[in-house]
Image (tube, rainbow, N blue to C red):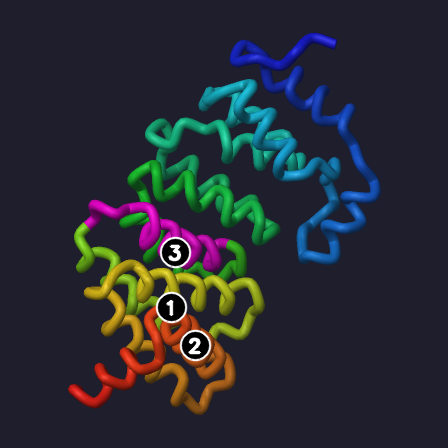
C-alpha cells in the first residue's frame, strides 16, 4: 500500500480512510452526540497523523469536504490553508454543518482565516443550530488563540453572548457558555466584563440564561479564586 504524502490526492486519501473503518468506534461516537451517518470510525489521533503525512493543500481540502464523509471533512479542517478560505466558501461549509465536532474543528479554520469579524455576527444571527454554534465556537477560539488581538475586539462579543444566551438548544447554549468562559479567562482585563455578563445571566428568570451564567461564574471562581471575585464585587 502506497504511503500517503503531500502529493496524495483526495481520492487516495479517502481510499485510505475507508481501509481504517471501525464499526466499534462508530457506535461509540454516537454516544457523544457525533453524527455517524457518513462516519468511518477513525480516532482523532489517527486523523492527526494522516493530516501530518499529507500536509496542507487547500484545493484537496475542498475535495475532501465535498465528499461529505465525516473523517474527510475533519481532514479538510486539519489541512485547509486558512488564508485561502473565502467568505463564500466559509458560508458554504457552514451550510453543511450537522455535528458539533465538525463545527468546532472548522471554527478554528474560520478564525485563522481572518474572516471571523464578518462571520461571527452573521452566524450568530442565523437560526440554524450548528451555524449559530459556529459563531460562539469562533468566539472561544479567538479569545484563546488571537493573543495579539486588542481585548476590546474580543469584549465586543459579549453583547452577542448576552443576546443569545436564552437559546435553549443544547449545542448552542453550550457554545455560548464556552465563549463566555474563554473570554473571561483570557486575561485580567477581560475577566470583569465577562463576569458582569455571567452574573446578570445567573440572576435571570430564564432557565437557559441562568445555566450559562452560573456555570461561567463557577469557572471564573475556579480559575481566579472565589475571594478575588468577592473582592471585585465589594469594590463595585
Residue 96 locus on image (x, y percent): 56, 44
Contact? badges 3 and 2 (CB < 8 Å): no
* Above or below, 40 relative to 164: above
Cα distance in 3D space between marks 2 and 1: 9 Å
Q: Of 53 and 153, which appears nearest the observer?
A: 53
In terms of sequence position, does the residue under pointer 3 or pointer 2 come before the other? 3
* Above or below, 61 relative to 117: above
Residue 118 locus on image (x, y percent): 29, 49
> Which residue is labeled 2 in the image?
218
Question: Circle 1: is it few (<14), some (14-19), or many (20+) Cα within 10 Å?
Answer: few
In terms of sequence position, does the residue under pointer 2 or pointer 1 come before the other? 2
Q: Which mark is residue 205?
A: none
Taking the spot 34% from the left edge, 51% from the top edge, the residue there is 144
Taking the spot 55% from the left edge, 63% from the top edge, the residue there is 171
In terms of sequence position, does the residue under pointer 3 or pointer 1 come before the other? 3
Contact? badges 3 and 1 (CB < 8 Å): no
> Which residue is labeled 1 in the image?
223
Q: Quadrant of residue 102?
A: top right
Verify whether residue 145 appears in magenta.
yes
- Which region of the structure is painted magenta? 131-149
Q: Is residue 153 left or right of residue 101?
A: left
Cα distance in 3D space between marks 3 and 1: 16 Å
Q: Of 127 and 228, which appears nearest the observer?
A: 228
Q: Is residue 97 left or right of residue 184?
A: right
> Which of the image's four quarters has the C terminus?
bottom left
Q: Quadrant of residue 139?
A: bottom left
* Element type at mark 3: helix
Taking the spot 56% from the left edge, 19% from the top edge, the residue there is 53
> Which residue is labeled 3 in the image?
140
Amino acid at each position: 500500500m502506497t504511503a500517503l504524502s503531500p502529493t496524495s490526492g483526495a481520492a487516495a486519501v479517502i481510499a485510505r480512510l475507508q481501509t481504517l473503518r471501525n464499526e466499534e468506534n462508530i457506535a461509540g461516537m454516537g454516544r457523544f452526540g457525533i453524527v455517524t451517518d457518513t462516519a468511518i470510525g477513525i480516532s482523532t489521533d489517527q486523523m492527526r497523523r494522516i493530516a501530518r503525512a499529507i500536509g496542507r493543500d487547500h484545493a484537496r481540502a475542498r475535495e475532501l469536504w465535498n465528499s461529505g464523509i465525516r473523517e474527510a471533512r475533519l481532514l479538510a479542517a486539519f489541512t485547509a490553508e486558512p488564508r485561502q478560505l473565502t467568505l463564500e466558501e466559509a458560508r458554504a461549509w457552514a451550510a453543511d454543518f450537522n455535528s458539533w465536532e465538525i463545527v468546532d474543528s472548522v471554527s478554528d479554520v474560520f478564525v485563522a482565516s481572518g474572516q471571523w469579524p464578518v462571520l461571527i455576527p452573521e452566524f450568530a444571527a442565523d437560526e440554524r443550530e450548528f451555524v449559530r454554534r459556529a459563531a460562539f465556537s469562533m468566539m472561544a477560539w479567538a479569545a484563546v488563540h488571537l493573543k495579539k488581538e486588542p481585548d476590546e475586539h474580543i469584549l465586543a462579543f459579549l453583547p452577542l453572548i448576552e443576546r443569545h444566551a436564552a437559546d435553549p438548544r443544547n449545542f448552542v447554549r453550550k457554545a455560548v457558555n464556552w465563549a463566555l468562559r474563554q473570554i473571561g479567562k483570557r486575561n485580567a482585563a477581560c475577566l470583569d466584563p465577562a463576569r458582569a455578563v455571567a452574573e446578570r445571566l445567573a440572576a435571570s428568570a430564564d432557565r437557559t440564561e441562568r445555566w450559562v451564567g452560573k456555570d461561567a461564574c463557577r469557572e471564573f471562581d475556579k480559575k481566579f479564586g472565589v475571594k478575588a471575585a468577592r473582592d471585585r464585587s465589594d469594590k463595585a
